[in-house]
Amino acid sequence: MVLSMEYKNITHTFDPVWDPECRVLILGTFPSVKSRENNFYYGHPQNRFWKVIAVLTDSPVPETIVEKKELLLKNHIAVWDVIKSCTITGSSDSSIRDVRTNEIGSLLAGSDISVIYGNGAKACELYDKHIRPETGREIVKLPSTSPANAAYRLERLCSEWEAIMAFLK
């Protein structure tokens, strides 16, 4: 039996994590089903985002939303998503359509962010198409921490993501 997933128009319901002292912005595409259920970024238990950030900052892996926010802000890392609302099937980036973007420019204007990274190719593609014309700022692609990116084990992800550390020291 094949289950068909319906397209749904969904609006992003949680705020970016940032403060004026952030120096790095990491952009995802749109929260997964698990992240939407948890009402916070990278909520799927197999997503390696929090493990990668913990390794890079020599910190324990955060468990709660409060711990996750503290880890990011203590290390001057902002996190948000490119998309404010879209039509999507489940968590599939490839199904995204009818995109409305977040106000990334206002976050950039209110902070010390010097570099923007995309968590995966789709985040970069959407940023370049919808937001870069407004901000004029480049985005640097990092391999996705999603469990769907099985080609990258944790060690390899950490090695690639280590580039963000140059802007945090």
Image: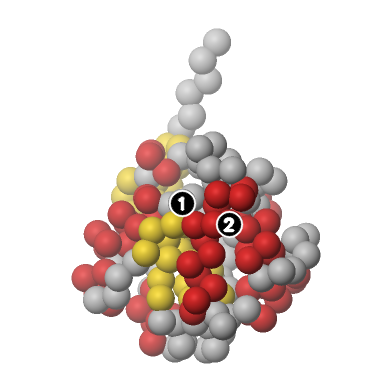
- Residue visible at 49% across and 50% down? 144
Classed neighbour count for the residue bearing mark 1: other residues with Cα under 10 Å, few (<14), some (14–19), many (≥20): some
Quarter of the image that includes the N terminus:
top right
Classed neighbour count for the residue bearing mark 2: other residues with Cα under 10 Å, few (<14), some (14–19), many (≥20): many
Q: Position of residue 45 (x, y in %)?
A: 69, 46
Q: Find residue 127 and report its image quarter.
A: bottom left
Give me the disc on residue 151: none
Which amino acid is tagged 2?
Answer: Cys
Q: Where is residue 137 in the image (x, y as percent from the top left)?
A: 29, 75
Q: Which of marks 1 and 2 is in front?
A: 2
Question: In screen coordinates, is 15 left or right of 126?
Answer: right
- Residue visible at 41% across and 82% down? 114
Image: 2 above or below 22: above
Residue 149 in view here: yes
Residue 35 in view here: no
C-alpha span from label 1 to label 2: 10 Å
- Residue visible at 31% across and 54% down? 125
Quarter of the image that includes the C terminus:
bottom right
Which amino acid is tagged 1?
Answer: Pro
Residue pointed to by mark 2: 158
Give me the disc on residue 143: 1
Q: Position of residue 161 (x, y in %)?
A: 52, 61
Q: Find residue 168 and report its image quarter.
A: bottom right
Image: 2 above or below 109: above
